[in-house]
Image (cartoon, rainbow, N blue to C red):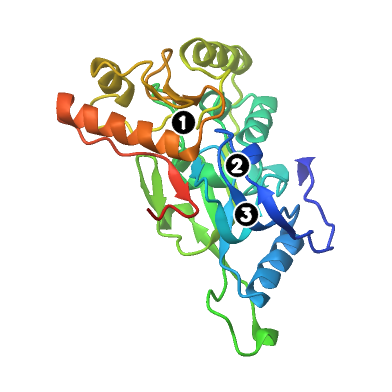
Amino acid sequence: MTGTSGHNTNREAPELRENVSLAPITSWQIGGIADVYAEPTNEEQLEAAIEEGAKRGLPITILGGGTNVLISDRGVRGLVIGLRKFSGIKTSEVEGRFQIEALAGTSKSELLKAFLKAKLEPAIFLAGIPGDIGGGVVMNAGVGEQLRPREFNEITDAIEVWRWPTTPLADMSIFKVGRQRLEAKSLNWSYRHCEGWRPGLISKVWLSWPMEPKADVLDRVKAANHNRLTKQPLDMPSCGSVFVNPVGDRAGRLIEASGLKGFAIGGAKVSEKHANFIVNTGGATAQDMRAVIEHVRARVKDRQGVDLKTEVVWLGDWTP
C-alpha cells in the first residue's frame, strides 16, 4: 500500500482544554465556547479522549470540519472532540480500482489531490467542496452539475463506525469503544443525506474508483474551481449551501425570486452573489444567522409555497 500521507501513530492522549472558543474552527466563524475541548490526531488519541470524557461523565459532541454547522452563542456543554487534525490518507491500486483509506477528519481537498494525482474523475466533483470526508459521507455531499460521479455514495465503499456507552458505568474498567465496518451498500443514501449508521461516530472511510485515468482531469478541475469562484462568495465566511434544493428546483432561485438577496440581520447576510449562501459580513452571531435562516424560510414559504429544508447541523444550547 502506498500513501499520500500516513496515519499518525502518536499514542499519547490529547490535551483536554477548558473554555475553548469554537468560532475560529468553523467556516462561519461563529459560535460560543466548549466546556472542554480535545483535538485528537489519530485513532488512539480519539479513543483516549472518548474514554476520558466518559470517565468524567461529560456529554460528548463530535465536531468535524466545521463547514456545515451553526454553533450556539451559548456554546456546547460537555466535551467537544474536534476532528480537524484527525487526518490521514492511504492509497493503493487493487484489481483495476484506485482505493483510498482515510480517517474521517481528512479534508475533501486531500481526497481531491489523491484522485487528481491518479487523473481520475472524482477529483472534478470534489473541486470546491469544503469540509472533511466524514462529513461528506454524512451529508452525501455532491454537486448539482451533471457529472459522473457527482455524490459521495458513488465513490464510498465502506465506513467504520465507533460506538460507546453514553450513560455512566458503575465500573469504568469495562468501558469499551466498539468498532463496526459497514458496507456502503447497506447504508440508506439519499439527496444530501446518509443514514443507517447512527448512533455513533464515523471514524474511517474507504473509497474507490475504476483505474481509468483521463488526460483532461486537471483542466476540468481548474474549470470547476473557476466556475465556483465566479458564482459563489468563497471570499467570505459561510457554510456553503444553507438549504437543500427542492426536487426539480433550486433553493437559490427560490430565495432570489422572493427578493431576499442582500437581506441582512446584524452581521448575517444573504449573499448577493449566490442566494443559497448566507455570509458572515463581520461580527455575526449565531442568533443573527438563525434569524436570517428563519426569515428566508418564512418568506419563501409565503411567496413561493415551498418549505425549504436546511443542510445545517445545529450544535450546542439552543433553548429559548
Would residue 247 be seen by someone viewing this image from the given angle? no
The reply to whether callout 3 and callout 1 are in contact (CB within 8 Å) is no
Q: Which mark is residue 34?
A: 3
Please tell me in which quadrant of the rendered image residue 266 appears.
top left
Helix, strand or loop for disc 3: strand
**65 left or right of 296?**
right
Disc on res. 149: 1
Residue at 48%, 39% in the rendered image: 286
Distance of label 1 from label 2 (alpha carbons): 22 Å
Callout 2: helix, strand or loop? loop
| Viewer-side residue, 119 vs 7 | 7
For disc 3, the neighbor class at 10 Å (few under 14, some 14 to 19, many from 20) is many
Q: Earlier in the sequence, mark 3 or mark 2?
A: 3
Residue under the image location 53 percent in, 78 percent down:
167
Vertical position of residue 303 compared to residue 34: above or below = above
Find the distance from the CA under tag 3 to the CA under tag 2: 16 Å
The residue type indicated by label 3 comes to Ala
Q: Nearer the viewer, residue 149 or 212?
A: 149
- Judged by depth in the image, the label closer to the viewer, 1 or 2, is 2
Disc 3 and disc 1: Cα gap in Å?
Answer: 37 Å
Q: Nearer the viewer, mark 3 or mark 2?
A: 3
